[in-house]
Amino acid sequence: MEAEPPLYPVAGAVGAQGDEDQLGVPDGPEAPLDELVGAYPNYNEQEEERRYYRRKRLGVLKNVLAASAGGMLTYGVYLEPGRPLHACSLYPGLLQMQLILHYDETYREVKYGNMGLPDIDSKMLMGINVTPIVALLYTPVLIRFFGTKWMMFLAVGIYALFVSTNYWERYYTLVPSAVALGMAIVPLWASMGNYITRMAQKYYEYSHYKEQDEQGPQQRPPRGSHAPYLLVFQAIFYSFFHLSFACAQLPMIYFLNHYLYDLNHTLYKVQNCGTNSQGILTGFNKTVLRTLPRSRNLIVVESVLMAVAFLAMLLVLGLCGAAYRPTEEIDLRSVGWGNIFQLPFKHVRDFRLRHLVPFFIYSGFEVLFACTGLALGYGVCSVGLERLAYVLVAYSLGASAASALGLLGLWLPRPAPLVAGAGLHLLLTVSLFFWAPAPRVLQHIGVLYAVAVLWGVGSALNKTGLSTLLGILYEDKERQDFIFTIYHWWQAIAVFAVYLGSSLPMKAKLTVLLVTLVAAAASYLWMEQKLRRGVVPRQPRIPRPQHKVRGYRYLEEDNSDESDTEGECGGGRGDCAEEEAGPVGSEPGPKPAGLCRRPCPYEQALGGDGPEEQ
């Protein structure tokens, strides 16, 4: 019986056609080297390049979707823009449920006795609202030190830490975690804004790689070239983010609403609502829970929220790619930590930022007004606590759907989205001046939902327009983290101002909101007028990177791989033959004793000691 032929031909063996294969090329040791290690015969360089950059573009889209979903889940568990102003003013998300439970007198006495939960809650809210005031001092340093992606991951982790402390509600767990959370708010938002802008720039590079090859790697793309992609990415991000308001109401709808009294009990002593109200829910009943939820059910709900927060961490860690190349990260850190600390303050010289500061402040005011003034003063005060979740869901869905309206900037003038959002909010604010719904009356609930949806539309135009505008005006990658830090720091200042003025009458709040809105719109249009006249903004100079760190292989005078002996011998120069070979045409010969040089890697591979050995 004949032996079966081998499954794979043996290297060097003579085949059935002698020492040649089916293509007539000699096989075995006599085969040409090009046939063994050469290019694939059907290799199409242009097609492979096109596929490579298509994978790169898909990776950028994956990064944008992962960052957007991570932000939505994080703020669906705890929603910072809806931070309350008083222990009875209600958070969306985890703290909404927590503070409703803590507000009920029966719940506090039965579960916690004399532990002093109201005092703990007030200190916790103070830590969350006051701490971001100093964020301008450390946010750029943290972003440059950790990197944009890792700063996002660290901040989301701090949010998850705050969620975990609710398993054991004590002063020494809630208050320190609230302070840490306040410190993470501005870095998270600054790194997210920077990340989305960088993804738009990278998508442009991967879509126009042929133009980049023609211009050269050091040539910057034309200014504003990434703007269409930035509009799309910001619309995607804020569509996801505004859904977090609706996600935050799921524990309220499916769990807590079953334990609440109806509006006839909770609003029994409430006399005035809307524009006639004073402070936050004056006269609201001290007992809002019909029955107390079991501790086991609370642990289940908190465990689900903790799992969601952990999933957000995994999304940022596993699916979000780096915003910068490793060498770019090194360059951003190498300008000096003192310069990184000072540059946010130096950017105040730019008139564009000064003109946008009122809009930054209004951006913080209007979201807080939607979650507290509108939802509480006009919503809960008239239709009851059990319908709070549905008012915020209406606001969320309106804002999420309207985020796509930011794409109108692809065809309309640049000021159109911001001015449209400001005009819509102006009409709604003036209308709210004259609306005082009666307590415990449900006839106007449709009007309330319509106002919430329209306010969400204005908020979406405001957020997408501002973030896109900053990404277009400041497209230098060396400045973006500073700019977004300034933007969200002013928002934090607005949050703190509202925290201090929580007890003002509703008419005073509407007046401040209206004045800020008019000033913001006028200042922004003045800025656009200056830019059309050709006024050149004054930007601080970004220092050149100083690469003095050993271990990074930069082509500089410092050779990071040389030994001490070589440094003393060659004066620290690791250049091959550029400086020591002498003029062209000179005869090779012995070099002076004082000029010793390390051979190049190519010379070392040939076994020589330098250019003398040919």
Image (cartoon, grey):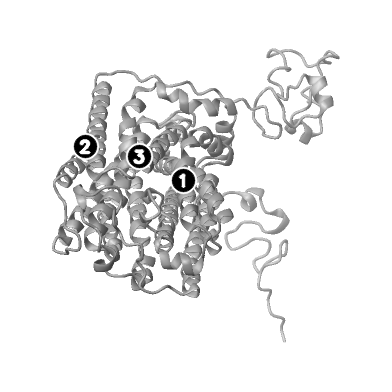
Q: Is residue 381 left or right of residue 23?
A: left
Residue at the spot of label 2: 419
Percent x, y of residue 304? 47, 67
Amino acid type, residue under disc 1 in the picture: Met
The local crowd at label 2, few if under 14, some if 14 to 19, many if 20 or more residues have their Cα within 10 Å, is many
Q: Earlier in the sequence, mark 2 or mark 3?
A: 2
Q: Is 12 placed above or below 362 here? A: below
Q: Which residue is mark 3?
A: 467
Q: Identify the residue at horizontal 47%, vertical 46% (top origin).
A: 128
- Kind of residue indicated by mark 2: Val
Q: Which label sits in the foreground, 1 or 3?
A: 1
Tell me what residue is drawn at x 83 percent, y 14 percent: 594
- Spatial distance from mark 2 to mark 3, Cα to Cα? 14 Å
Q: Which quadrant would residue 473 be assigned to in this image? A: top left
Q: Earlier in the sequence, mark 2 or mark 1?
A: 1
299 or 520, which is in the foreground?
299
Does residue 432 appear left or right of residue 192 in this picture? left
For numbered disc 2, what is the local secondary structure? helix
Q: Please rate how many residues cluster around mark 1, counting C-alpha atoms within 10 Å: few if below 14, some from 14 to 19, many from 20.
A: many
Whole-percent x, y for residue 456 in the image:
25, 51
Residue 45, horizontal then vertical, whole percent: 48, 46
Q: Tell me the distance, in whole angstroms, between the alpha carbons under discs 1 and 3.
A: 28 Å
Secondary structure type for disc 3: helix
Give the label on residue 80, or none. Answer: none
Nearer to the camera, 53 or 32: 53
From this viewpoint, is residue 88 visible? yes
Residue 496: % across, % down:
40, 40
Provide the residue designation for mark 1: 126
> In this rendering, would 324 be left or right of 565?
left
Apparent side of residue 161 relative to residue 247 in the rendered image (left or right): right
* 1 and 3 marks in contact (CB < 8 Å): no
